[in-house]
Amino acid sequence: MQIRELALTAISFGQEIRAQRPVLMDVRKLTAMTDFFVIMSASNTRQVEAIADNIKINFKDTLEILPQTEERDDKSQWILLDYGDFVVHVFLEDTRDFYDLERLWGDAEITEVI
């Protein structure tokens, strides 16, 4: 499976738990640290955790892929799953608006996924 397809699969796993406003950002021309950012939101912290957990469990169970690292703030307003070639960001809606990665990485090609 290609990297872009894996990143889109992460979005699909997030949408199973009602992830909101999912986007795929192609950052290959902007940084060497990863190829894609996956960004999605949730309306509450329990949903942030559920989305991230669903992505991790499904990648592990169906594709035998584990994140290289996982980071989160102490209030579960933001969780990052680093799969190397793509990084998944799951935000509480207000936290996503605050960090505004889409603007910060504004030169990236952004694909909104419905």
Image (spheres, grey):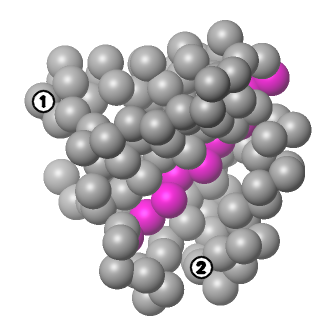
Residue occupying the point 34% across, 26% down = 56
Residue 41 drawn in magenta: yes
At a point 65% along the width and 85% down the height, the residue shown is 107
Would you place residue 14 above or below residue 21 in this image?
above
Residue 92 image-quadrant placement? top right
Residue projecting furthest to the left: 64
Number of on-image labels: 2
Identify the secondary structure beneath mark 1: loop
Q: Secondary structure at mark 2?
A: loop
Pick whichever, 107 or 18, lies toward us. Answer: 107
Magenta-highlighted residues:
35-43
Is residue 20 in view from this perspective?
no
**Neighbour class for label 1 at 10 Å: few (<14), some, many (≥20)?**
few
| Kind of residue indicated by mark 2 | Ala
Q: Which residue is mark 1?
A: 64
Report the residue marked by disc 2: 108
Residue at image point 18% right, 52% down: 1
Image coordinates of residue 7 in percent, x first then y, are: 39, 51
* 3D distance between C-alphas at marks 2 and 1: 29 Å
Provide residue 110's location: percent of width, then percent of height: 63, 69
